[in-house]
Amino acid sequence: MGYGFKIIVDGDNACFTRPEMKVERVSYDVPTPSALEGMIKSVYWKPSIRYVIDKIVVFNPIRFMNIRRNEVKNKVSLSAVTSAMNGRGGVPEIFISPEMISQRAGMILKDVRYGVEFHFEMTGLRSDHEDECEEKHYNILLRRLRQGQCFRQPVLGCREFSVRSLRLVDRFPLDEISPELYGDIDLGYMLYGLKYEDNDMPINNDWNDPVFSDRADPVFYRPHMIDGVIDVAAYRRDIRC
């Protein structure tokens, strides 16, 4: 196991979407490991490391709320934005029209607080820096976590549900776990993450202008939450494609 960390994150809302819900967004009761990996990548990420979630602690009672959200069906093309920035091609259409918006219902989590224990591992991919090593990545991530730095806003599942606070801790205050979460709770089959065909490497072998494959297989696991704690590492060997 590589260098490990413990963090506590808080948020007003969260949505860890169940993939079986085709149209409306419905959240899992607890975060998926892949969602937490993406959140940590917002703090620090390099091709030479990968994050692995080892434990998830759920502090607050699991509460849902129903909302309606405006989702955009189309994306503005990068070429149109580039042309507008460079003043070429007249006036390209880079706006979002009402026809591009669809209103959908969502069942999301509210008032969430999680403890996340994780570590990183080396992928074997190296950059141009000769001094790249585990200790260097550890010190950079440690400094960024202590100072509350990130290169993009960390989120809890969906992009509109921002993390309110993210802080590094030495241990989790397990006495603050809600009594409602005590006992053995079978969470059923949950999405663990996506296994991409390209194995997180550019298919054109060019990290300066990378092209990745969008083809991926979902990976599931069936965890139990014991007194508010999900030991992800213990269930990792039971994941299913």
Image (spheres, rainbow, N blue to C red):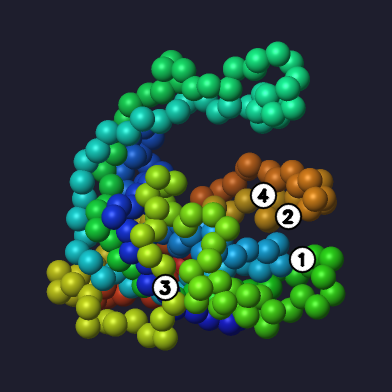
Amino acid on which disc 3 is placed: Arg
Q: Determine which residue is flagged by label 1.
A: 125
SS state under label 3:
strand
- How far apart, in angstroms, are the residues tagged by discs 1 and 4? 17 Å
Evaluate if marks 1 and 2 touch, with contact meaning CB atoms under 8 Å apart: yes
Foreground of the two, 79 or 157: 79
Q: Nearer the viewer, mark 4 or mark 3?
A: 3
Evaluate if marks 3 and 2 touch, with contact meaning CB atoms under 8 Å apart: no
- Label ID, residue 197: 4
- How far apart, in angstroms, are the residues tagged by discs 4 and 2? 9 Å
Mark 4 crowd level (few <14, some 14–19, many ≥20, 10 Å Cα): some
Q: Nearer the viewer, mark 3 or mark 2?
A: 3
- Label ID, residue 181: none
Q: Residue at x 42, y 86 (%)?
A: 170
Q: Nearer the viewer, mark 1 or mark 4?
A: 1
Evaluate if marks 1 and 4 touch, with contact meaning CB atoms under 8 Å apart: no
Q: Earlier in the sequence, mark 1 or mark 4?
A: 1
Amino acid on which disc 1 is placed: Leu
Mark 1 crowd level (few <14, some 14–19, many ≥20, 10 Å Cα): few
Decide: is 89 above or below 189.
above
- How far apart, in angstroms, are the residues tagged by discs 1 and 3? 29 Å
Q: Residue at x 55, y 72 (%)?
A: 144
Q: Determine which residue is flagged by label 3.
A: 167
Q: Determine which residue is flagged by label 2.
A: 201
Q: Earlier in the sequence, mark 3 or mark 2?
A: 3
Q: Is residue 223 shown to the viewer in this render?
A: no
Q: Position of residue 106 (x, y in %)?
A: 29, 39
- How far apart, in angstroms, are the residues tagged by discs 4 and 3? 34 Å
Q: Earlier in the sequence, mark 4 or mark 3?
A: 3
Q: Is residue 213 shown to the viewer in this render?
A: yes
Amino acid on which disc 4 is placed: Glu
- How far apart, in angstroms, are the residues tagged by discs 3 and 2? 30 Å
